[in-house]
Amino acid sequence: MGLLERNFASLFVLNQEDQAEGEVLAREYLLGAGVGLLGMYRDLHTMEQSGLPDPLAYADLSGQFLEAGGYKRLHRIERVAVDFGFAPEDLGRSLDSFSGGERRPLKLASAFVQRYDLYLLDEPTTHLDYQSVELLETILKEFGGTVLFTSHDRYLSERVAERKIYL
């Protein structure tokens, strides 16, 4: 039998204690992985808040944001956040208003907003409540890509993993 070879262009690594961090809104945190999208989003928001003093500049920037996939990304952020148990209005909250138990699912949500080729997850259920574990299980089952995870949660392993290695 030959060696299976795969090339992965992008990789997401979740360490056991990782959680969402920063002094930003949840929506900005989830958008932050998009190249240049966060800056454009903030500039658009600032223009909107100030009553669109220069409509042509706003239209130009809005077009750039569209071309860069920003509006699609915002839509995906809402879908993924809801999948991880957050209400759309939660996306307007600052990260420091979330509990540690809510920041972990936000970190996981950020991974699936971006869509990586390979996910390496170390104890992905750490600090997750029962509902969040069920949501993660559903997302992992529906995800068509490659996920490698370590877990002491045998229930998750039995329900999600196609192949298992016991050490």
Image (cartoon, rainbow, N blue to C red):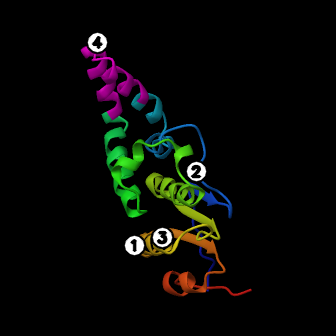
Reading the image, the residue beneath label 3 is 136
> Which of the two discs, 4 and 1, sits closer to the camera?
4
Q: Is residue 22 magenta?
A: no
Q: Amino acid at mark 3?
A: Leu
Quadrant for the C terminus in the image: bottom right
- Circle number at residue 142: 1
Query: Which numbered disc flags the more N-terminal residue, 4 or 3?
Result: 4
The CA span between labels 4 and 3 is 44 Å
Report helix, strand or loop for mark 4: loop
The CA span between labels 2 and 1 is 23 Å
Q: Amino acid at mark 4?
A: Asp
* Horizontal relation, residue 21 to residue 142: left or right: right
> Which of the two discs, 2 and 4, sits closer to the camera?
2
* Horizontal relation, residue 14 to residue 129: left or right: right
The CA span between labels 4 and 1 is 44 Å
- Circle number at residue 20: 2
Query: Which numbered disc flags the more N-terminal residue, 2 or 1?
Result: 2
Residue sitting at x 33%, y 17%: 50
Reading the image, the residue beneath label 4 is 54
Quadrant for the N terminus in the image: bottom right
Query: Which numbered disc flags the more N-terminal residue, 1 or 3?
Result: 3
Image vertical order of residue 51 relative to residue 145, above or below: above
Is the residue marked by circle 4 packed among few (<14), some (14-19), or many (20+) residues within 10 Å? few
